[in-house]
Image (cartoon, rainbow, N blue to C red):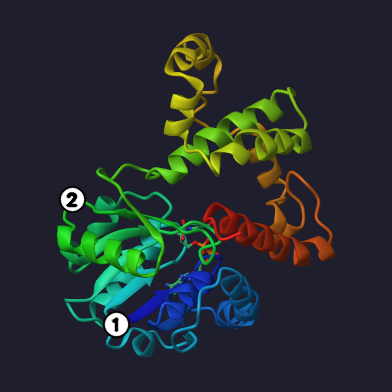
Amino acid sequence: MKIAVIGMGSMGPGMAARLARGGHEVTGYDLDSAALARAEKLQPMIATALDGLGIAAEGAPVRFLSNLEEAVAGADLVIENVPENVEIKATVYARLAALVSPDTVIATDTSGIPITKLQAHVAEPARFVGMHWSNPPHIVPMIEVIGGEQTAPETVAFIRDLITSLGLLPVVLKKDVPGFVENRVLYALLRECVDLVDAGVIDPVDLDTCVNWGIGFKLSAIGPMRLLDMAGLDIYESVSSFLNAELSTRADVAPMVAQKNAEGNLGMKTGQGLFTYSEEELASLPVERGRKLVALRRILEGRE
Ligand SMILES: NC(=O)c1ccc[n+]([C@@H]2O[C@H](COP(=O)([O-])OP(=O)(O)OC[C@H]3O[C@@H](n4cnc5c(N)ncnc54)[C@H](O)[C@@H]3O)[C@@H](O)[C@H]2O)c1
């Protein structure tokens, strides 16, 4: 299959590499030449992770192109990976309308903008679908598939089958809700974590230890629904009957995070966020995290 990945920021390079490893003919496009160069430079690190997962290289490497027309020529599938902003995404869809065939499936990697909302900006809404990868996309095997009101069932099936054929795990949503499922769950967790740190209940470093080695450690082996059965639904009922009322329900952004952003401390991308990062850490952390995730996945898949 011929696949074009549009947007080579955080998500595009790994996704494109994973698809190419599956034997597909993949192009990567970005309007920023620096992003294209960065994506190409990241390929050896991504390849090391894919090798570690035992995913054999079946096809040619990704071709990085600075010309959109050339990148999408003859594409069966275009995956849009540009910033999480309806106007920017709509601009891309308008350009694609003039360049691809009406049969081309256009998928968006939006983190949670309803597909029905984005669908209003595409030429062939029946062939438009959500394909929500998880970061790092070449390592995390689960991908959400979301149809909007006008998405044809065949389009959902096309993406689901592609994911399955790659040996990955499609999760098809039954409803197009904001944030889909993965980010609704993640943001519920993050809201509570940020609130606990903000309220002075715990230091950030201890919060991470609590989640990493407590629930996070368990959740990679036992999902929340199974965990409920394991703990006992009677326990859940008695604890949630008093604890649910205590949990954060704030609808705005926690002051701690808003303040850091206002100061320009955005996290690793600026070297300082909730923690401070040295140049060495900024270089080593992505490699180290990739190595751990690859090792963990091999164990969870029963390969070690
Ligand atoms: N970062 C994550 O963890 C993550 C996870 C899952 C999904 N997503 C979603 O994936 C999408 C991309 O996120 P990201 O984190 O990779 O963003 P990013 O900001 O890192 O990268 C976006 C890239 O798109 C390029 N771009 C902007 N306008 C463009 C245009 N008109 N044509 C081509 N390229 C253009 C930018 O130059 C940039 O390189 C978003 O919708 C985001 O919500 C992100």
* Residue found at x 59% / y 77%: 47
* Residue found at x 77% / y 65%: 284
Against 94, is 194 above or below? above
Question: Does residue 152 appear in this view?
Answer: no
Question: In what quadrant of the picture does the C terminus appear?
Answer: bottom right
Q: Which mark is residue 149?
A: 2
Camera-nearest residue between 75 and 241 = 241
Q: Where is residue 137 in the image (x, y as percent from the top left)?
A: 51, 63
Against 224, is 243 above or below? above
Horizontal side of residue 148 vs 210, given as left or right = left
Residue that mark 1 sits on: 75
Ligand 1 within 8 Å of disc 2? The answer is: no
Residue 299 image-quadrant placement: bottom right
Horizontal side of residue 141 vs 286, given as left or right = left
Horizontal side of residue 231 vs 34, given as left or right = left
The amino acid marked with disc number 2 is Glu
Q: Position of residue 128 (x, y in %)?
A: 24, 63
The amino acid marked with disc number 1 is Ala
- Give the mark, 1 or 2, whose residue is nearer the N terminus: 1
Question: In what quadrant of the picture does the N terminus appear?
Answer: bottom left
Residue 51 image-quadrant placement: bottom right
Q: Position of residue 132 (x, y in %)?
A: 40, 57
Camera-nearest residue between 284 and 258 = 284
Q: What element carries label 1?
A: loop
Mark 1: few/some/many CA within 10 Å (<14, 14-19, 20+): many
Q: Where is residue 139 in the image (x, y as percent from the top left)?
A: 54, 63
Q: Is mark 2 on a helix, strand or loop?
A: loop
Separation of marks 1 and 2 at Cα, in angstroms: 24 Å
